[in-house]
Image (spheres, grey):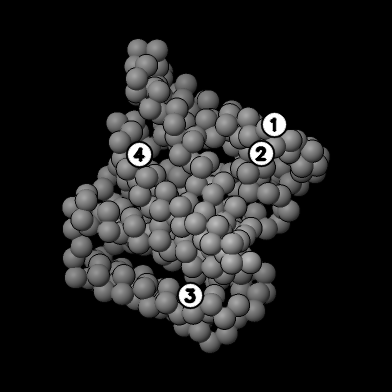
Amino acid sequence: MKKNLFKGSLFTVGASLWWGVLGVVYFKFVSFASPLELTVHRTIWTALLLIITTSYYSKWSEFNKIIKNKINIFILLFTGLLISVNWFTWLYAVKTNNLLDSALGYYIFPIFSVFFGIIFLNEKYNRNKIISILLVMVGLIYFLIKLGEVPWIGLTVAITFSLYGLIRKKVKVSSDTGLLIETLLLTPIAVCLFLFLANKGANIFSYNEPILSFYLFWAGLMTLVPLFWYTKGFSLIGIGPASMIFFLTPTAQFFLGIFYFNEPLILNELVVFIFIWLAVIIYLNELRKE
């Protein structure tokens, strides 16, 4: 039991820090490509690598079982679109030095998930869960009033990711097989978008730029490795501990944004983060009880 806890925690910490540190550094490095082209590459190369891993682990029977149901295909197409919007928004935040906004989104997405679960799935709730939701709402309203703008990056990241998790519950499929189907369904769209960029001369990936093209190929691996690690950790230690460890991701992004990329943090933004952190503390305490 202790061995599983240690191993699972190691996988989950590794995945969370990969998303929060290595992923940021890599996608910042390849931000010479536009967020749209990077989203295209994440989709196509992730699909290719998942075909390889699905063959290696002999999981095509699960794949075939899922795609036989047309409703599953429709659901996974929609969740694929959600995760693509999530990827694009996050990549835009990295490119434009808005990591603090993306960190805000990943802090509040689990609490949005609780809110959506209560609204759409009639999941159980208590006073503390309601307080955490209200604190997030107060923080967002404060942001709107004091800064005069909607934190659209954080909200888009949070809403798309929480809806993604909510809707994916409708299909009983492993995370890697589900992502394979999603990326395969989106690959034709991704190819069309790449051709559009190429026609405009806005693409980086080409025969003329072999080194830069090689760097972009790794977008798939940078997506899959933390996913496999987190899934493995999740299976060993359960949803509660894995969800708690996940908060290393936005925390790492927050500190990278401030101390490495020198993003400004004004007082009113700090107040918003304090509201969010209080909500997260309450949420984590609830996870600890489960």
- Amino acid, disc 3: Leu
Label 1 residue SS: helix
Which of 147 and 16 lies nearest the eye of the viewer? 16
55 in relation to 203, above or below: below
Alpha-carbon distance for marks 3 and 1?
A: 38 Å
Q: Tell me the crowding category of disc 4: few under 14, some 14 to 19, or many 20 or more residues within 10 angstroms, Cα based.
A: some
Q: Position of residue 62 (x, y in %)?
A: 77, 42
- Residue 242 appears anywhere in the view: yes
**In the shown orientation, is residue 278 left or right of residue 233?**
left
Label 3 residue SS: helix
* Residue with the mark numbered 4: 26
Q: Nearer the viewer, mark 4 or mark 2?
A: 4
Q: Tell me the crowding category of disc 2: few under 14, some 14 to 19, or many 20 or more residues within 10 angstroms, Cα based.
A: many
Q: Earlier in the sequence, mark 1 or mark 4?
A: 4
Q: Which mark is residue 55?
A: 1
Q: Earlier in the sequence, mark 3 or mark 1?
A: 1
Alpha-carbon distance for marks 1 and 4?
A: 27 Å
Q: Which mark is residue 284?
A: 3
Q: Position of residue 263 (x, y in %)?
A: 21, 54
